[in-house]
């Protein structure tokens, strides 16, 4: 969805990408992770072994809190800098995968949630991302529930269908955002706006 919004002119702040950048070799973030979890979370080349760290943190709430306490402040700092650097009048899209889990939905003007059924989510994690079913279920269990995500949403974009259906819905949302920016739409558009 983010790529589509960027193609329409949005400025993207991708928290997932930033979270990878702040733990690259030589960064304060990676040093803190190694201090917290030990050198076994490093790959042979000195980079973060993300699958190994993921297995640790998605299986243990305390480990997840420790990791979040390291990475999230660094991501927030970088995101704020990118937001400040956006051209005046830009529509800035913050792609935040763990928005609800971290109680951050109130920090944004509008929350768009891309919604999928649990069955589709499981299928995509195991098929598209190559996770085992057990790892995929552990990751899903560690995230906000579907109901929690939907409750946080100002706009829900269904995504159990085709890419074309998603693209059409995102285009509708973008048009709504443009109308909102021009003062022609409600401040908080509904899913049908």
Image (spheres, helix red, strand yellow):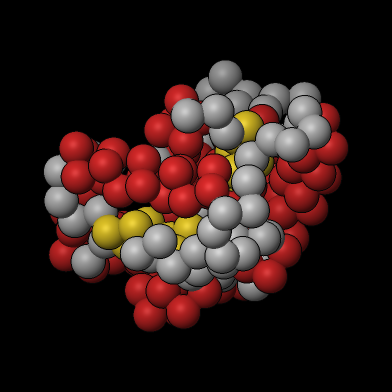
x 40%, y 61%: residue = 193
Outermost front residue: 184
x 51%, y 54%: residue = 97
Image position, residue 155 (x, y; %): 44, 64
Dividing the picture into quadrants, the one containing residue 28 is: top right
In the image: residue 59, left or right of residue 135: right
Outermost top residue: 45
Image position, residue 119 (x, y; %): 16, 64
Task: Tell me if residue 66 can be seen.
Answer: no
Q: 91 or 84, which is in the foreground?
A: 91
x 41%, y 33%: residue = 4
Dividing the picture into quadrants, the one containing residue 147 is: bottom left
Q: 15 or 37, which is in the foreground?
A: 15
Task: Tell me if residue 45 can be seen.
Answer: yes
x 64%, y 72%: residue = 103
- Above or below, 45 against 29 in this view is above
Dividing the picture into quadrants, the one containing residue 74 is: top right
- Above or below, 162 against 160 in this view is above
How many marks on residues?
0
- Above or below, 6 against 135 in this view is above
Image position, residue 10 (x, y; %): 57, 33
Instruction: Name the image quarter holding the N terminus.
Output: top left
Image position, residue 78 (x, y; %): 78, 39
């Amino acid at each position: 969805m983010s790529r589509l919004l960027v193609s329409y002119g949005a400025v993207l702040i991708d928290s997932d990408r930033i979270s990878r950048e702040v733990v690259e070799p030589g960064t304060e973030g990676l040093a803190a992770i190694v201090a917290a979890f030990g050198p076994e979370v490093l790959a042979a080349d000195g980079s973060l072994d993300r699958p190994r760290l993921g297995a640790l943190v998605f299986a243990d709430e305390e480990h997840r809190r420790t990791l979040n306490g390291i990475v999230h402040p660094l991501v927030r700092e970088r995101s704020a800098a990118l937001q400040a650097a956006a051209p005046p009048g830009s529509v800035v899209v913050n792609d935040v995968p763990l928005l609800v889990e971290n109680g951050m939905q109130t920090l944004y003007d509008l929350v768009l949630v891309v919604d999928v059924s649990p069955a589709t989510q499981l299928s995509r994690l195991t098929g598209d991302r190559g996770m085992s079913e057990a790892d995929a279920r552990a990751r899903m269990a560690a995230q906000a529930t579907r109901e929690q995500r939907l409750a946080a949403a100002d706009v829900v974009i269904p995504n159990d269908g085709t890419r074309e259906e998603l693209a059409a819905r995102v285009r509708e949302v973008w048009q709504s955002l443009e109308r909102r920016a021009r003062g022609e739409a409600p401040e908080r558009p509904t899913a049908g706006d």
